[in-house]
Image: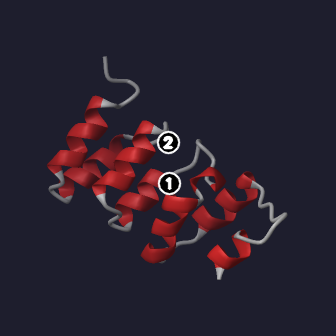
Amino acid sequence: IFDYLMSEEGVYINPDEFSSVFLSKRKHNTLFLNMILDKYLYLIINGSNIISVAIKNKVNNERIEQLIICGYNYDEKDIIHVLNDKNIKLAKIMINLYPDNP
C-alpha cells in the first residue's frame, strides 16, 4: 500500500516527520523496513538511529553497510550488538568506518 501511495503524482512526505513516526515504533516489519531502505531512504534523516533499527531487525549486511557509507549514525552499542551476534564481517566494516577511528 505504501509503495502504491508513494507512486502517486504529487505525493510528498516530510522526511523529518516520517523519520520521527517510523523510528518511534517499537516493532518494525522487516519487509517494510527493507522496502524503505531500498526505495525510500531519502525519507530517513541522516541523524536518525536507522542503523540500530536495522541491526535489531536482522537487516542484511549489504543494506547496513550502505547506511554506514551514506553517513547514517551508529555508536559503540551498535558495534557491540553486531559482535554479540557474531557478525564479524559487519563489525569490521563498522569499526573501520567509525567516525572517531583514528
Mark 2 burial class by Cα count in 10 Å: few <14, some 14-19, many 20+: some
Question: What residue sits 51% from the left and 68% below the top?
Answer: 35
Q: Nearer the viewer, residue 81 or 14?
A: 14
Residue ranking furthest to the top: 102
- Of the 4 image quadrants, the one containing the N terminus is bottom right
Q: Position of residue 57 (x, y in %)?
A: 38, 68
Residue behind mark 1:
50
SS for dot 1: helix
- Of the 4 image quadrants, the one containing the C terminus is top left
Q: Is residue 42 visible?
A: yes
Q: Is residue 87 above or below residue 26?
A: above
Residue ranking furthest to the bottom: 1
Q: Position of residue 20 (x, y in %)?
A: 68, 59
Question: Residue 72 got which mark?
Answer: 2
Q: Is residue 91 above or below residue 97?
A: below
Name the amino acid, label 1.
Answer: Ile
Residue ranking furthest to the right: 10
Q: Is residue 82 above or below residue 96?
A: below
